[in-house]
Image (spheres, rainbow, N blue to C red):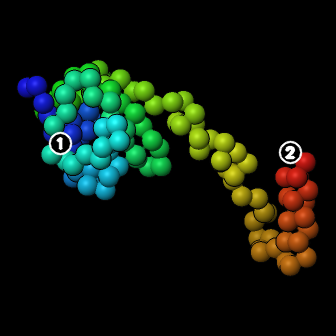
Amino acid sequence: MDKVRVDKWLWSVRIFKSRTIASTACKAGKVKLGDQKLKPSHLIVVGDQLLVQKNGYNLQFEVVKLLQKRVSAPLAQEAYVDHTPADELNKYEKWFVGKAAPEHREKGAGRPTKRERRVLESFKDDYIEED
């Protein structure tokens, strides 16, 4: 077992939930080896550096161990080294700051009137500009 299909490996180490999803990602050009886009049938070897685009993240993995079958999560983590930069993993945290929850309104108060909405938006604009 010197080589394994890339879609099978991505599925077996639990980067993708199913082999079909892994295969579709490869076909869409979201799995790369350097600058080369990989087909699902591309054979990978130990030491390959894979770039995977998943859910808006650019993940980087180094193949340490080749697996043919899906294994438990602790065993799967031993099969690769994650080289994804920390700022890539945290890029959405900065975007979500201050966007966690909408304003709270008392139950039964109904929708804000046009005047109340304008006052609220004015307050939010003043608050955001100060930061």
Q: Residue at x 26, y 23 (%)?
A: 47
Question: Residue 87's x, y, as percent?
Answer: 57, 33
> Outermost residue, front direction?
35
69 or 119, which lies in front?
A: 69
Distance CA(mark 1)–CA(mark 2): 50 Å
Query: Dot 1 corresponds to which residue?
Result: 42
Q: Residue at x 88, y 52 (%)?
A: 129
Question: In this rendering, does residue 18 appear at all?
Answer: no
Q: Check disc 2 and give the amino acid type.
A: Asp
Q: Earlier in the sequence, mark 1 or mark 2?
A: 1
Query: Quarter of the image containing the N terminus?
Result: top left
Q: Confirm or deny contact between disc 1 and disc 2 (CB under 8 A).
A: no
Disc number placed over residue 87 in the picture, else none:
none
Disc number placed over residue 131 in the picture, else none:
2
Q: Residues within 10 Å of mark 2 (few under 14, many from 20)?
A: few
Question: Residue 66's x, y, as percent?
Answer: 18, 26
Q: Quadrant of residue 15?
A: top left
Left or right relative to 114: residue 13: left
Between marks 1 and 2 in the image, the one whose residue lies nearer the viewer: 1
> Outermost residue, bottom direction?
114
Left or right relative to 112: residue 57: left
Q: Residue at x 17, y 42 (%)?
A: 42
The answer to whether 47 is drawn above or below residue 14 in the figure is above
